[in-house]
Amino acid sequence: MNRLKALRKERKLRQKDLANRLNISQSTISDYEKQKRVIDLKTAEMFAEYFGVSLDYFAGRSKYRGPNAGVLISQKYDELFSMIMKLEPTALRFVTLLIRVYLSQEDM
């Protein structure tokens, strides 16, 4: 299984869901996963950024996920990140605001 498919399934996303979020076609995602089509560098960078992994990890050249090689994200943070990535833009803005308000109260 290639990394794109593994990362998508890890986040419990259908090809259609991922395609809609990244504004590409579902058939393109399918072709990438079946390795019928080669992912260009710009698109690979987009996928790596979306999934929060390094380009090396996405390309299968590293076993370390994070942008900083050797730094592994704990399972709790990975689960939280996965939930955040599934939020619609309006919900994401709300959660961001909620976190900012919470953190500003800690400073008091």
Image (cartoon, grey):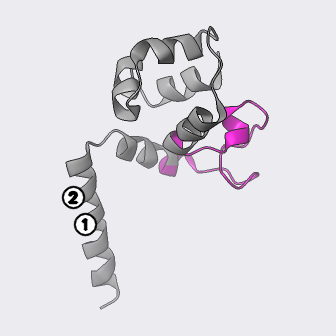
Q: Quadrant of the N terminus?
A: top right
> Over which residues does the magenta segment extend?
51-77
* Identity of the residue drawn at 34% across and 25% down: 17
Which residue is at the front of the view, 43 or 21? 43
Which residue is at the front of the view, 82 or 45? 45
Question: Magenta region, mostly helix, strand or loop?
Answer: loop
Q: Quadrant of residue 3?
A: top right
Q: Quadrant of the C terminus?
A: bottom left
Tag 1 residue: 97
Three-letter code, disc 1: Leu
**Residue 8 spot, x, y in % from top left:** 49, 26
- Residue closest to the far right: 61
**Residue 27 spot, x, y in % from top left:** 44, 11
Q: Answer above or below: position of 65 versus 60.
A: below
Quote the CA–CA distance across marks 1 and 2.
5 Å
Which residue is at the front of the view, 37 or 70? 37
**Residue 32 spot, x, y in % from top left:** 58, 16
* Identity of the residue drawn at 36% across and 47% down: 84
Tag 2 residue: 94
Three-letter code, disc 2: Phe
* Identity of the residue drawn at 66% across and 35% down: 41
* Identity of the residue drawn at 24% across and 65% down: 98
Q: Quadrant of residue 33?
A: top right
* Circle 1/circle 2 CB separation < 8 Å: yes
Report crowding for label 2: few under 14, some 14 to 19, many 20 or more residues within 10 A (C-alpha). Answer: few
Q: Quadrant of residue 13?
A: top left
Q: Is residue 63 magenta?
A: yes
Check disc 2 and report its element: helix, strand or loop: helix
Left or right of 46, for residue 24? left
